[in-house]
Amino acid sequence: METAPDTPVTVPLRAAVAALPAYVPGARPSGTAHKLSSNENPYPPLPSVLAAIQSAASEVNRYPDMYATELVEAIAAHVGLAADQVVVGNGSVAVLHHVLEAVVEPGDEVVFPWRSFEAYPIITAVAGGSAVTVPVTADGRLDLPAMAAAVTERTRVVLVCTPNNPTGPVVPADDLETFLASVRRDVLVVVDEAYLEFVRAPEAPDALDVLRRHPNVVVLRTLSKAYGLAGLRVGYALAAPRLAAGIRATSTPFGVNHLAQRAGIAALQAPALAEMTAHVEALVAERTRVRDALREQGWEVPDTQANFVWLALGERTAGLAAEAAAAGVLVRPFAGDGMRVSIGEVAANDAFLALAATWR
Ligand SMILES: *Cc1c(COP(=O)(O)O)cnc(C)c1O
């Protein structure tokens, strides 16, 4: 039965939902455009991962393993923790939803940096939390002292994005330690390491060590970026067993599909791991080349440790992003603020650098 188009909808949406900003995905290419708008891995799936997906395809009439037992064990072995400290989900965005659903009571405050990952305000609102944002510094770094000062009696969660999407720098280990020492132990601190594999800065924290010493920490990681599985959706949380159980309890049943489970397991095995590492190394080299070329052109580029660079273009952002799209280079504009440009194939990076030179 179809609803007549002029029938008024009388069911109210929750106020927090009605007020939600839309998640703006990176522009999708048509034809031959270079897609540097979504922080994706430009390399195609690795052969062993592709083979795992292909063989799993013949089994999709069955439900997946609800607890993704083998995938969880593979991740646990990979990071060196027990399986009861690992929770997987449909991308780490979904896992973050479950983390907040597990701990946030209506009106609890969730502190996060801004600008940062655009899913944070959405996930906070959906969980019934109240967002408290703390501006990043002029050079795109998290201001942890200001974030510590923003913690009140009503704060339940603090989100720490390192490296920060979309600006790029990592949180130094010493700063994170000072921050953790200053917040109450019943405040959950989420360390979002979506770009961990691209980090080369020696001052970056060892989040697993931090987790061992601070049971109020949850570490978020993903197979979307370095592992190149963005289209399959596998992310995970690492946490103390009691917190992990809470996050698991709020998770969508069968939330990681069968293809994603099999692909994730294959991605964490020796041949794929070595290939992934080589690809990441090449992308890190490209990141350095792009960053240095931009600085040579005269741009101020934050010290990115991820697979993207940030140009704080302010009011010029939207116009220049449109110009780039017209020239066949898709970037991610944040209107009035800046432009995030993912590191892609050499030709794509060159096309972007040529454009950036004309903008000086
Ligand atoms: C990309 C990204 C994620 C996760 O992405 P999924 O594909 O959902 O795993 C999480 N946090 C940040 C900061 C990201 O940039």
Image: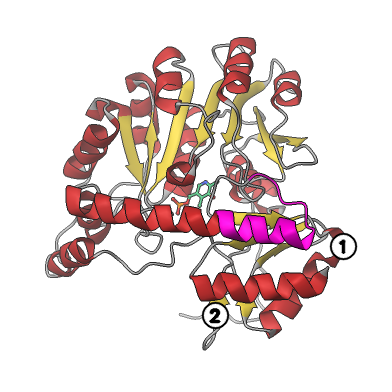
Tell me if residue 22 can be seen.
no
- The numbered mark, 2 or 1, whose residue comes first in the sequence reads 2
What percent of the width, then of the height, locates residue 358?
79, 75
Mark 2 burial class by Cα count in 10 Å: few <14, some 14-19, many 20+: some
What percent of the width, then of the height, locates residue 16?
68, 46
Q: Secondary structure at mark 2?
A: loop
Q: CA distance from mark 2 to mark 1?
A: 24 Å
Question: Was residue 294 drawn as part of the magenta stretch in this picture?
Answer: yes
- Reading the image, the residue beneath label 1 is 315
- Reading the image, the residue beneath label 2 is 29
Q: Is residue 86 left or right of residue 168?
A: left
Magenta range: 288-303
Q: Report the residue at 70% width, 77% height from top.
A: 324
Mark 1 burial class by Cα count in 10 Å: few <14, some 14-19, many 20+: few
Q: Is residue 69 above or below residue 23?
A: above
Q: Secondary structure at mark 1?
A: helix
Task: Please name the amino acid that badge 2 sits on.
Answer: Pro
Q: Which residue sits furthest front?
A: 296
Quadrant holding the C terminus: bottom right
